[in-house]
Image (cartoon, grey):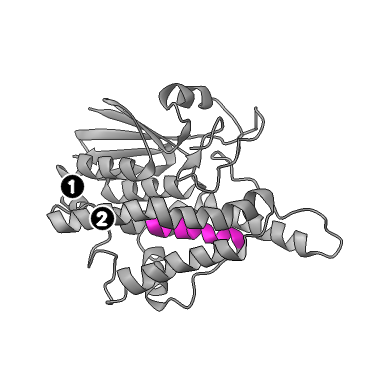
Amino acid sequence: MPKHTLYLSRGSAPCRAVLYHLSRISTKSVVTEGLFLIGDVAKPTAEIQIVDVDLNGGAHVEVLQGINPLHCLPTLETPFGPLWESRAVMLYLAELAQTENPDAWTFYPRKLYQRATVNRLLDWDQGTMYRAIGEAVYPLVFQGEEPSDMKLAALAKVVTHLDENELSDGRPYLTGHDMTVADISIAMGLSMLRLAGLEVDDVPHCESWLARMNQSPGWAEVNAFAFDAWVERAKAARAAADEPDSDEPPTTEPPESDPTATPTEPPAKEPEPDAPESPAPAAAG
């Protein structure tokens, strides 16, 4: 049975996108053991083991550094070699599952135009949407710096495009009636706005689509493991910074992947605003 190892940090939007996609295409998941099976349960064609990487350092850091020269998360170790960049990982997993699980075809459609549209949306997400999110959110969350009006305007522009040009015809998902990896990647990216206390509003089509994504089976569970707690810490940090006697900037560290882990190394280098992926402890991805 081909074995795969997926290294991730569950607070990261790209990592959560891969994890959610994996949960939807697997024929069986043993969440408590971080194990996903693809194919027949009795004789699966692939096994994916989840490894949570502690962003403050830990046992898996040196292993990850030896696999991925960029040291970024998520990273998938396959029988053929390592693979990183969350969108590429999702497409690989979709192809891997499609021969065994007919439902997996909906996430990366067979039809040429639909598949090309998914690819287009993923490219736009990485180069435009998630970049705008990072430039508006990361400085506030990691350095306590308020985003400039220009960065907020750039973010509003891409969200408006999503609303008016990708969802305005009332379709339930970005490419039609079925959720694809494009929906998963973009919606998980937009969840990062919660860290800065920003809302997606005055864009009715986008709001309806996000509500649909948030209500999808397993969506809340993937976010609850680490991200929701990170959002609460960020909210508390902003509240503390607003106190009259507070001189501290509203910074907050990303969550450790293992809530019980004890940091053994200095904190990770934080991602640059335009970094598309989640950083591993050694470097930004």
Q: How many marks?
A: 2
Indicate left or right for 155 with 175 as reference.
Answer: right
Give the CA separation, mark 2 to mark 1: 19 Å
Query: Which label number is shown at residue 93?
Result: none
Measured from the top left, where is residue 260 in percent x and y?
Answer: 61, 38
Residue 265: quarter of image: top right
Residue 122, visible in the rendered structure: yes
Q: Which residues are magenta?
A: 186-196
Query: Which label number is shown at residue 118?
Result: 2
Please say whether residue 193 is one of the residues in the magenta stretch.
Answer: yes
Instruction: Name the residue rendered at 35%, 55% in the picture.
Output: 124
Indicate left or right for 195 with 202 as reference.
Answer: right
- Dot 2 falls on a residue whose secondary structure is helix
Measured from the top left, where is residue 270 in percent x and y?
Answer: 59, 41
Instruction: Name the residue rendered at 47%, 78% in the picture.
Output: 202
Q: Is residue 117 above or below residue 58?
A: below
Residue 229, visible in the rendered structure: no
Given this view, does label 2 or label 1 mark the residue nearer the observer?
Answer: 2
Measured from the top left, where is residue 153 in percent x and y?
Answer: 53, 67
Instruction: Name the residue rendered at 65%, 35% in the picture.
Output: 267
Residue furthest front as drawn: 150
Disc 1 residue type?
Asn
Query: Which label number is shown at residue 101?
Result: 1
